[in-house]
């Protein structure tokens, strides 16, 4: 890929070295459609639409985030600082409805203006849903017949699921999001012995990996060396970390690009077990 070249991959939209996951790409494009609609309304209908858009967006984002936190209070109680970790994702759209309606009623009191404002919101939501639908991979390949050498133990063949769900995490020691999510994944591997976890390091020396585990006091099962980056190539993916959730039959149940949260991990593990 040339410098500055953009292309769509299984796990995101790549622009040079930058990677935006597909779910976040859908959100960004939805907001762009909303902003274009609002700009037209501000110029041609009423200048109050500009102020309304900022207030409605702020009220919607904050309330959707707080709603997600309240819905998952058990996981946030252990690490309350994660309330601010919005880069992990986690927003509950229904919680945003009432605050947006209140802002609309206060800033756009006339029914005609309120209707235009809600139409702008609807256009953004439709664009978001459409892009999300179009970028959802329904034909992802099954687990490949690839055997990778473990740093401590026998080689691991990815396709040999033995009837168990499989979680594959691609990672590297130089990757900050990888390091942040590793303790969570290590805990999940211990808590779910019925799931096969594979941690595929991307192109690093075994000595460096062992030194990292020693410093961080991490114990992980099935740490394998993917020096040729065979897993990302097989799935047409770029960037780390990426976590694949595979059903017992080898089909892909879902994936997550970037640092994963406890809530997302729980949901995708459940999908892989179905």
Image: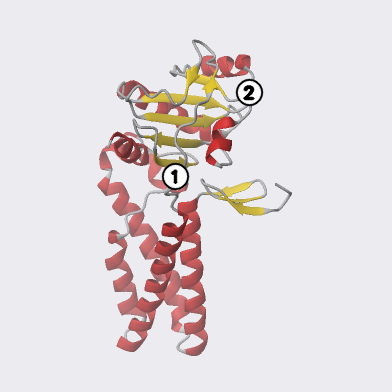
**Label number found at residue 88:** 1
Disc 2 or 1, which lies upstream in sequence? 1
Residue at x-position 41% and y-position 28%: 185
Q: Which color scheme did the rendering employ for the protein? A: secondary structure
Task: Establish if 53 lies above or below 165.
Answer: below
Q: Nearer the viewer, mark 2 or mark 1?
A: 2
Q: In this view, does 222 lie to the left or right of 102?
A: right
Few, some or many C-alpha atoms within 10 Å of disc 2 (few <14, some 14-19, many ≥20)? some
Residue closest to the far right: 3
**Label number found at residue 204:** 2
Disc 2 is placed on an element classified as: loop
Task: Establish if 89 lies above or below 226.
Answer: below
The quadrant of the picture occupied by the C terminus is: top left
Give the image quarter of residue 197.
top left
Residue at x-position 36% and y-position 36%: 79
Q: Is residue 144 left or right of residue 263?
A: right
Q: Is residue 97 left or right of residue 196?
A: left
Give coordinates of residue 18: x percent, y percent: 62, 48
**Residue 139 visible in the current orientation:** yes
Few, some or many C-alpha atoms within 10 Å of disc 1 (few <14, some 14-19, many ≥20)? some
Q: Of residues 151 and 229, which is closer to you in this image? A: 229
Give the image quarter of residue 254.
top left
Give coordinates of residue 182: x percent, y percent: 46, 28
Give coordinates of residue 236: x percent, y percent: 56, 42
Disc 1 is placed on an element classified as: helix
Mark 2 and mark 1 residues within 8 Å of each other at the beta carbon: no
**Residue 110 visible in the current orientation:** no
Give coordinates of residue 32: x percent, y percent: 51, 68
Residue at x-position 39% and y-position 70%: 56
């Amino acid at each position: 890929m040339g410098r500055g070249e953009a292309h769509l991959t299984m796990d995101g939209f790549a622009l040079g070295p930058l990677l935006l996951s597909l779910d976040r790409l859908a959100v960004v494009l939805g907001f762009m459609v909303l902003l274009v609609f609002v700009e037209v309304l501000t110029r041609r209908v009423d200048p109050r639409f500009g102020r309304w858009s900022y207030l409605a967006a702020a009220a919607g984002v904050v309330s959707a985030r707080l709603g997600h936190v309240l819905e998952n209070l058990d996981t946030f109680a252990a690490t309350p600082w994660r309330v601010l970790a919005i880069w992990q994702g986690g927003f509950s759209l229904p919680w945003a409805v009432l605050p947006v309606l209140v802002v609309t009623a206060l800033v756009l009191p006339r029914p005609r203006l309120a209707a235009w404002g809600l139409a702008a919101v609807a256009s953004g939501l439709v664009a978001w849903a459409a892009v999300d639908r179009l970028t959802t991979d329904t034909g992802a390949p099954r687990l490949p017949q690839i055997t990778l050498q473990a740093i401590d133990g026998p080689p691991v063949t990815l396709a040999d699921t033995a009837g168990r769900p499989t979680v594959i995490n691609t990672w590297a020691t130089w990757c900050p999001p990888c390091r942040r999510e590793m303790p969570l994944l290590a805990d999940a591997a211990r808590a779910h012995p019925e799931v096969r976890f594979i941690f595929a390091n991307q192109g690093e020396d075994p000595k460096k990996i062992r030194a990292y585990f020693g410093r961080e006091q991490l114990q992980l099962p099935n740490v394998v060396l993917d020096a040729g980056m065979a897993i990302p190539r097989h799935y047409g993916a770029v960037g780390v970390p990426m976590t694949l959730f595979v059903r017992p039959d080898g089909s892909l149940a879902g994936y997550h690009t970037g640092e994963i949260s406890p809530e997302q991990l729980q949901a995708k593990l459940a999908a892989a077990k179905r």
